[in-house]
Image (cartoon, helix red, strand yellow):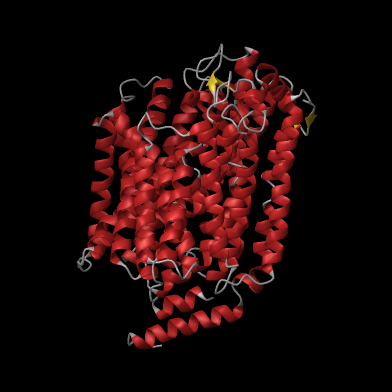
């Protein structure tokens, strides 16, 4: 009976999650009384909440759909995005957890550009950081909204509800829920839905892992042997991409985390500086568990298709949805689909919040305007406009432009912000000119490499190349120009 | 030598490796990256691994070693105070050695894998096992380092006191009642 009602169970699970988001939004409304609450959760988050928010922000819908799809398509190659977790989070925490948190409290910062301006004493650095964030947000948000809508549409169509299984309806419904809890609860709602999402992901990933092992003839060894016999490179350490491509991903996904604004902004929100000590291992534990889903579904589906036990997929991103339909218990399937929705929404809400901060707070401040009188009201209003704007952009723009801006994301943030933020917050010789050059070059190089005729050799990721170049420029300009005076309080914090 | 100078040098070395990949040109009689799977749509294949990596394998090994050292230097930068690392630098260096060793194990066992040594270890061929159980897990060392040395080397009670004094100075300057 459960199998017959599989699709209804999935619809119900997703609907339940949406109701939960609305409830969190209403609860968070009472906790959101200022822009500090709206953008920084009052700098009052506990260890567990911060840790789950950090790892959930790292894994968007990519962790549920894109990741398994990449493993299906390329074999072990994409795991070079997963294995950096330990070293990557370590780099982020060693470089940023302490100083970013202290800068935030010292200057009562409500955004990353605020912290950058405090470090460099430069409104131009604030402005460029905000613009880089906004460019990334537009692309990321549009693709996340589309992803939510596609998932919802497929769920409704599978349940036989063709009348409402239209893309524009699904965009409207999913956006409406997103906007509601983001407007009412700001980052507080975002963070607590991250907690729900992270919890679902951890539990679901372990259950999916066991389901994947059982689905393939011979378990893990059987899957590995099948893939090896079909193509030894696919299960080798570099997958089908090759050594240089994989190692470039290792570089980008290790260091790049320290430049993702939707992730590192969370490091400004914990209650005490010393909480970072426990936040790191909890974050890593959550991420490691959640990554089991990514790895197991991808490997299982590749083996199942090669064995002939499952039809070839219509596209690589169908790996996870088809696995859940065919091999997971209906309730597990419902939980994971809800988790998928949660994953996409939690990344979207984080971007919505930092994009709003860039428009309402950072860019006006950089241009010399004082904060509007009712900043919280304007923050809520702009949240609506940004979400609606991104939704319209996603629905009615040239899809190649949406895809272009979506691909912009991780690599561009890494190249633009790792030098200025992760390195610059630890190195007194770094100055605003170097930071600005790194931000501009990071954005420009990543954009340039979207051109189809520009390719890196041996599959080397352009984002990794851009990161190396922007870091080199950052250090070079800092060494070549006179050291600037740093605000005494900032300098004192940098000495701690 | 200062951490910043070491980092700058490493960046030039990384750029040199990338430039090297351009200069050596694509492999002969093999794809330089993934190719379409011969029978299954939306899946890729790796092609002949030995030929694919023939020109670029030493560069790849250099790239891997350099980037691991770079990560470790970044950790040291984060742990430093006034560009001095202190004793935690020794612990970071030990972790770096272990990390590099894991990577070299992948590279060396990959050569054997290409020659047909495809036995499974904990369910995976040797180089992939070194990757999943080595490269993924060895850096947990740094997480444990952060956890167990935080109070001594990252943010001590004395640091907290100094930070509170900085905040108090700020409040007095801004006329806030301390």
Image: B169 above or below B38? below
Please indicate whether residue B105 sits to the left or right of residue A349 in the image: right
Please indicate whether residue B132 sits to the left or right of residue A357 in the image: right
Q: As drawn, which residue projects farthest toward the front?
A: B23
Image: A86 above or below A272? above
Residue drawn at point x = 38 percent, y = 64 percent: A116
> Which quadrant is home to the C terminus of chain A?
bottom right
Q: Position of residue A375 (x, y in %)?
A: 24, 64
Residue drawn at point x = 68 percent, y = 53 percent: B140
Residue B116 in view, yes or no:
yes
Q: Position of residue B68 (x, y in %)?
A: 63, 50
Image: A356 above or below B151? above
Q: Position of residue A467 (x, y in %)?
A: 46, 48
Query: Which image quadrant is residue B151 in?
Result: bottom right
Residue drawn at point x = 29 percent, y = 66 percent: A123
Q: How many marks?
A: 0
Q: Nearer the viewer, residue B22 or A314?
A: B22
Q: Position of residue B29 (x, y in %)?
A: 58, 18
Please indicate whether residue A390 sits to the left or right of residue A28 in the image: left
Image: A134 above or below B166? above
Residue drawn at point x = 55 percent, y = 56 percent: B9
Q: Nearer the viewer, residue A376 or B112?
A: B112
Query: Which image quadrant is residue A162 in?
Result: top left
Query: Which image quadrant is residue A145 in?
Result: top left
């Amino acid at each position: 009976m459960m199998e017959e009602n599989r699709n209804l169970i999935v619809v119900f699970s997703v609907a339940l999650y949406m109701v939960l988001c609305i409830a969190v939004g209403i609860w968070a409304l009472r906790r959101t009384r200022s822009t500090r609450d709206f953008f920084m959760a009052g700098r009052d988050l506990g260890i567990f909440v911060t840790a789950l928010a950090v790892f959930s922000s790292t894994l968007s819908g990519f962790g549920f759909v894109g990741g398994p799809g990449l493993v299906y398509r390329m074999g072990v190659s994409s795991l070079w995005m997963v294995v950096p977790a330990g070293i990557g989070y370590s780099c982020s925490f060693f470089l940023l957890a302490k100083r970013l948190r202290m800068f935030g409290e010292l200057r009562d910062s409500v955004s990353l550009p605020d912290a950058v301006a405090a470090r460099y004493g430069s409104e131009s650095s604030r402005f460029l950081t905000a613009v880089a964030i906004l460019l990334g947000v537009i692309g990321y948000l549009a693709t996340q909204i589309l992803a939510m809508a596609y998932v919802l549409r497929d769920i409704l169509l599978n349940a036989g509800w063709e009348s409402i299984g239209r893309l524009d309806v699904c965009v409207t419904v999913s956006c409406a829920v997103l906007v509601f809890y983001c407007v009412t609860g700001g980052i507080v709602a975002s963070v607590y839905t991250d907690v729900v999402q992270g919890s679902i992901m951890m539990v679901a990933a372990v259950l999916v892992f066991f389901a994947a092992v059982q689905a393939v003839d011979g378990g893990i060894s059987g899957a590995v042997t099948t893939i090896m016999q079909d193509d030894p490179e696919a299960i080798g350490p570099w997958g089908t991409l090759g050594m240089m491509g994989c190692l470039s991903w290792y570089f980008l996904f290790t260091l790049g985390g320290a430049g993702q604004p939707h992730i590192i902004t969370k490091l400004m929100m914990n209650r005490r500086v010393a909480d970072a000590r426990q936040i790191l291992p909890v974050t890593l534990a959550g991420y490691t568990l959640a990554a089991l889903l990514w790895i197991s579904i991808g490997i299982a589906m590749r083996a199942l298709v090669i064995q002939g036990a499952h039809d070839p997929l219509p596209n690589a991103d169908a790996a996870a949805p088809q696995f859940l339909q065919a091999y997971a218990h209906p309730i597990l399937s419902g939980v994971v689909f809800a988790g998928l929705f949660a994953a996409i929404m939690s990344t979207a809400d984080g971007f919505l919040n930092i994009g709003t901060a860039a428009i309402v707070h950072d860019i006006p401040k950089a241009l010399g305007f004082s904060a509007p009188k009712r900043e919280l009201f304007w923050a809520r209003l702009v949240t609506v406009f940004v979400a609606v704007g991104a939704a319209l952009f996603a629905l009615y723009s040239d899809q190649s432009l949406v895809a272009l801006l979506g691909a912009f994301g991780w690599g561009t943030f890494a190249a633009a912000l790792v030098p200025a933020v992760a390195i610059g917050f630890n190195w007194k010789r770094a100055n605003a000119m170097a930071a600005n050059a790194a931000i501009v070059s990071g954005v420009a190089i990543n954009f340039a490499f979207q051109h189809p005729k520009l390719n890196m050799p041996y599959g080397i990721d352009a984002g990794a190349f851009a990161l190396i170049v922007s870091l080199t420029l950052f250090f070079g300009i800092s060494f070549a120009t006179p050291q600037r005076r740093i605000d005494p309080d900032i300098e004192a914090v940098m000495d701690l | 030598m200062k951490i910043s100078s070491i980092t700058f040098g490493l960046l030039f070395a990384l750029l040199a490796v990338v430039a090297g990949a351009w200069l050596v040109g694509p492999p002969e009689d093999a794809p330089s990256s993934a190719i379409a799977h011969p029978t299954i749509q939306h899946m890729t294949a790796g092609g002949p691994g030995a030929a694919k990596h023939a020109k670029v394998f030493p560069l790849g090994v250099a790239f891997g070693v350099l980037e691991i050292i770079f990560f470790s230097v970044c950790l040291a930068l984060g742990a430093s105070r006034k560009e001095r690392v202190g004793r935690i630098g020794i612990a970071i260096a030990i972790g770096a050695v272990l990390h590099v060793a894991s990577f070299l194990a992948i590279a060396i066992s990959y050569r054997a894998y290409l020659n047909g040594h495809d036995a499974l270890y904990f369910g995976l061929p040797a180089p992939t096992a070194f990757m999943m159980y080595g490269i993924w897990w060895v850096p947990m060392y740094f997480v444990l380092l952060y956890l167990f040395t935080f109070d001594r080397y990252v943010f001590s009670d004395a640091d907290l006191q100094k930070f509170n004094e900085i905040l108090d100075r700020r409040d007095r300057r801004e006329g806030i009642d301390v």
